[in-house]
Image: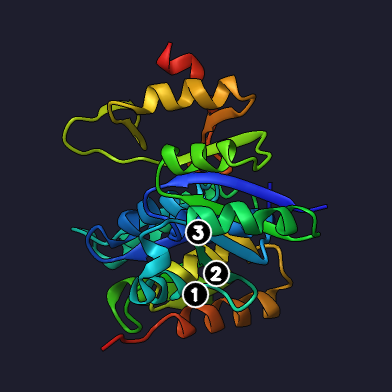
Amino acid sequence: MTGRCGVVVAHGRLGEGLISALTRVAGSQDNLWAVSNDDLDAESLMADIESLVAERGSGREAILFSDLDGGSCCQACRRLLTSGAVRAVFYGVNLPLLIEFVFLQDLPFDEFCEALLKKSRGALGVHS
Amino acid sequence: MSKVLFRVDERLIHGQVVVGWGRRLNPNRIIVVSDSVSREPVEQDIYRTGLPASIEAVFWSLDEAIKGLPAVLGSNESVILLTEDLETMMGLARGGVPITEVNVGGLYASEGRTRLLPYVWFGADDKQRVQELEALGVRVVAQDLPTTAPVRLRERVG
C-alpha cells in the first residue's frame, strides 16, 4: 500500500471518465477514485469525499483533483483542505496529471506537487 | 545484456506502450518494425509526439530490422520493439532474430476477426501464426499492460 490516495472531484462524469482512461494506459489503481457533484449540494459533496477518504483511504494522505478552480467541486475540496481532511487540492485535472500521480505518488510532498504540475502543464499544447 | 520487449500492437507507439510498459521497463529506444511506416516520415513524426526525451524512436523495415537487431541485442540497451501484426513478428523470427517471447498487446476488432480477449481479435491467419511461432520456440503471450494477467495464446487457439 502506498502512502497516498486520490479522489477526482469533478462535474458530470469527468472523474470516472478520466479514471477509465487512466486504467487503459496505466492499469487499474486501488487508491484513486472519482466523485461527481451531480445533484449534490455543497455539504453532501464534501460528505461524499470525506467518507470515501475515510472508508477506503486507510489513513493514507488524501490528494484531491478538481476540474475548475473556483467551481463548486473545487470549493468543496478547498473546504476539506481547510478542515485538514486532505493534504492538497490540484485543480485543472487532466489525464497527464493523473498518470504522474500513479507513478510519482511516493515522492516527498513538495517534490510530488511540483512534478505533477510540471508534467500536466507541459502536456498542454496545440498542433496546427 | 540488452532487454527487449517484443510486442505486437496495431497502435504501435501509444499510451499503453509509453506509459504502461515504458514506466515499467524504462526503455532508451522504441524500435518500430513496419515496412509501411518506415517509408512515411509524417507518420513517424506523429508517433514520436509525446515521447519523453529519454526515449528515441526508430522506424525500420523488416529487412532493416533483421540486419540491425543483432547489434541491438548485443548491446546493453533497453528496447521496446513493436510490430503491427503477428506476420511481421514471424518475419523477424524466420529472419533469425532470437525471440523467446512475444507480447501481444493489441489486435483490435474489425470485419472478419474473432474475439479472443477484449484487446485481441484474430483474423483468418493469426491462429496459424501463433502455432508457427510456438513451433519455433517462441512463447506468444497476450498482455496489454504490465498490471493485467498474461494469457498464453496457444491455449486459446487450440
Residue at 56%, 43% in the rendered image: B92
Mark 3: which amino acid? Val
CB under 8 Å between callouts 2 and 3? yes
| Residue visible at 47% across and 76% down in the picture | A90
Q: Chain of mark 2?
A: B
**Which residue has dot 1 on it?**
A89
Q: Quadrant of residue B118?
A: top left
Q: CA distance from mark 2 to mark 1?
A: 36 Å
Q: Are marks 2 and 3 on the same chain?
A: yes
Marks 1 & 3, CB-CB < 8 Å contact: no
Total numbered labels: 3
Residue B26 placed where, x, y %?
Answer: 68, 61
Quickly name the residue at label 2. B57
Query: Where does the image place residue A8, in percent across and percent down from the top left?
Result: 41, 62
- Judge the density around disc 1: few (<14), some (14-19), many (≥20) Cα neighbours within 10 Å: many
Work out whether disc 1 and disc 3 sit on a shared chain: no
Of the pair B111 and A11, the residue shown nearer to us: B111
Q: In the figure, is residue A54 to the left or right of B128? A: right
